[in-house]
Amino acid sequence: MEKITLFGKTPDELKQVVGELGMKPFATKQIAEWLYKKHARTFDEMTNISLKDRQRLNEKCSIGLETFSNVQSSADGTKKYLFPTEKNRFIEAAYIPDDDRATLCVSSQVGCKMGCLFCMTGKQGFQSQLSSGEIVNQISSLPEREKLTNIVYMGMGEPFDNLENVMKSLELLTSDWGYAMSPRRITVSTIGMIPAMKHFLEKSECHLAVSMHTPFHEERKKLMPIENVFPIAEVIETLRAFDMGRQRRVSFEYIMFKGLNDSTKHVNEIARLLNGMRCRINLIRFHPIPDTPLESSDETVIQQFREALVKKGIRTTIRASRGQDIFAACGLLSTKALVKMQTPDF
Amino acid sequence: MDTGLSGFIKKLPLKPLSLININQISPDAYILSLPKTHDFLPGQVVAITLDASVAPRLYSLCSAPKDETMQILFSVKPEGLLTPKLVNCSKGDQLLVSTPFGAFLGDEQPAWWIASGTGVAPYRSMLRAGLDHNKKLIHGGRFAHNFYFQDEFASALNDNYIRCCSQESGDGLYHGRLTTWLHEQQQLPAHQMYYLCGSAEMVVEVRDILIGKGIAIERIMSEIYF
């Protein structure tokens, strides 16, 4: 019989397992503490649980933590970790140290079904959803876990296409019974799946990043098929209607493509769309992927674009490219080489 | 924190509609007919689910705006949460359905329609809406029974209807994947649109082929099974 995986379960879910195993109710809190506070990787480490109960747990359950199976290190200090998931699949997570900050970019799906023209993950198609435990495992099993200051859901996959597990992972990271992280240290990125985004805005306090990449509907349709069903203008209107409070941050990700989305016309339209909205734009250099006709804008154009947006009153930053030499930079995460592709339907 | 799906579903304006009927049109595909509550454009989608326990999925309408019902085409995914339940629905059952929306729209301009499997649905809507002039359909499927609406497409498009069958050979079929058929084309028309609809795998692979053959990204429009 398949063992029950405990890592990733909420106290209510753990309580149910504890009940089914005939253990005392207080064992729920003990197990949660060992899993999420003391980072136990075996039941034998849970020394305040009776030997008999530990034997029961060993028989019926598994912790569910997975050690990384490979790591690559960049000259700039970035590290890319490969983690196994169910069914012999793999995901990547990028650890990005930077002075007093250390950010982990986590994956939420194996592959992605959004098909954005500029993204390497999209090239491998979609293989499976990650469970909440598999998402948080990327943090728990990270050698640099204690150094982490920020988590960004910007790795493989579209987080809001795996809403339930992503929300559960956020609960695990921010709850007192879990990792007790401030939601202000967590950013979830989306291409703008409006219904799921609304749910996230209402039920979480974490920051939000929206992939814009162009303010024009027809142009965005060619870059990001999601624009057909959830246009960026409606995404922004949805955000406008929501009270973010003073602490919560909304940012827009904007990859700079040479001759495509880096003109004055784009600056003006961004300014029109975001007029009066408290937000930030993050300009990102494009990191080329195979078979793409796209190129990154020149450095001077990126600087001029930033200055033009700032003049329009929009807080704009340029994201530093990190880990490009190990394909850990933005848009480059992929486990395509490890995917045994499903039988295609075409 | 509420991590359930109920909140997600509430964000889409879903309304209960009674199923008119469900027809099996091939061993693996069904057409589901619903009352037409709103006007729509050929190529638009609706979100559908059965109840709050299953997240809604988006389906292209395969009927035309002039038709009396709204129809969707679906195949059963055994591992899926929705289609194994949908297939067991019967006349009068209540489904939760959104109003039609989406911008993957057909027009009168010359274009190639490219689809895999049930991705042919929006093109059937466009066909029935009279947008088939100057169109070529390249449809990929594993088996001969995967070419849904083939009589209608063959009748309207004649030689401009290409069926690429990867697992079977047969009369009028190109035996091979649609990506192979595309690779074999010496030159593709550069000044027309290319519509792609199907799985993410198909869309990204076909898009790369088209770009590799010199088609500008402005001329490629994609719709994926989200």
Image (cartoon, helix red, strand yellow):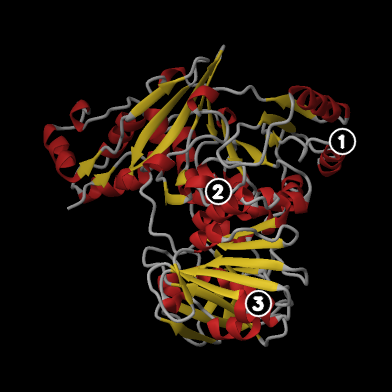
Q: Residue furthest front?
A: B186
Q: Which residue is mark 3?
A: B125
- Chain under callout 2: A
Q: CA distance from mark 1 to mark 2?
A: 32 Å
| Quarter of the view holding residue A184 | top right
**Disc ID at residue A160:** 2
| Quarter of the view holding residue A318 | top right
Q: Are marks 2 and 3 in contact (CB under 8 Å)?
A: no
> Hey, what amino acid is under mark 3?
Ser
| Quarter of the view holding residue B124 | bottom right
Give neighbour class at mark 2: few <14, some 14-19, many 20+ (Cα, 10 Å).
Answer: many
Badge 3 element? helix
| Same chain assignment for discs 2 and 3 | no
Q: In the depicted view, which residue is nearer to us: A243 or A250?
A: A250
Badge 1 element? helix
Q: Are marks 1 and 2 in contact (CB under 8 Å)?
A: no
From the top left corner, tell me how far across and down residue A183 is, in percent.
Answer: 56, 32
Q: Does residue A60 appear in this view?
A: yes
